[in-house]
Image: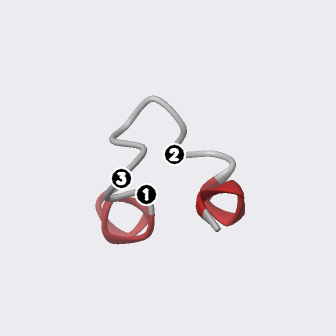
Amino acid sequence: MRFFGLKTNGLKSKDISPHFNIQ
């Protein structure tokens, strides 16, 4: 979940799954 953290930096760990949703 660390690698997802940089992608979901704005979503925190609440949306680690939909990391693509950050855009």
Marks 1 and 2, the one that precedes in the sequence: 1
Marks 3 and 2, the one that precedes in the sequence: 3
Amino acid identity at mark 1:
Thr
Q: Which residue is mark 1?
A: 8
At 69% from the left and 65% from the top, the residue drawn is 20
Whole-number angstrom distance, CA of label 1 to CA of label 3: 5 Å
Q: Is residue 18 above or below residue 19?
A: above
- Rendering coords of residue 22 (x, y %): 59, 59
Q: Secondary structure at mark 2?
A: loop
Q: Nearer the viewer, residue 6 or 2?
A: 6
Q: Nearer the viewer, residue 23 or 5?
A: 23
Report which quarter residue 23 is drawn in.
bottom right
- Rendering coords of residue 6 (x, y %): 31, 70
Q: Name the residue furthest front.
A: 23
Viewer-nearest of discs 1 and 2: 1
Amino acid identity at mark 2:
Ile
Q: Is residue 3 above or below residue 19?
A: below
Whole-number angstrom distance, CA of label 1 to CA of label 2: 6 Å
Report which quarter residue 11 is drawn in.
top left
CB-based contact (under 8 Å), mark 1 and mark 2: yes
Q: Which residue is mark 3?
A: 10
Q: Which residue is mark 2?
A: 16
CB-based contact (under 8 Å), mark 1 and mark 3: yes
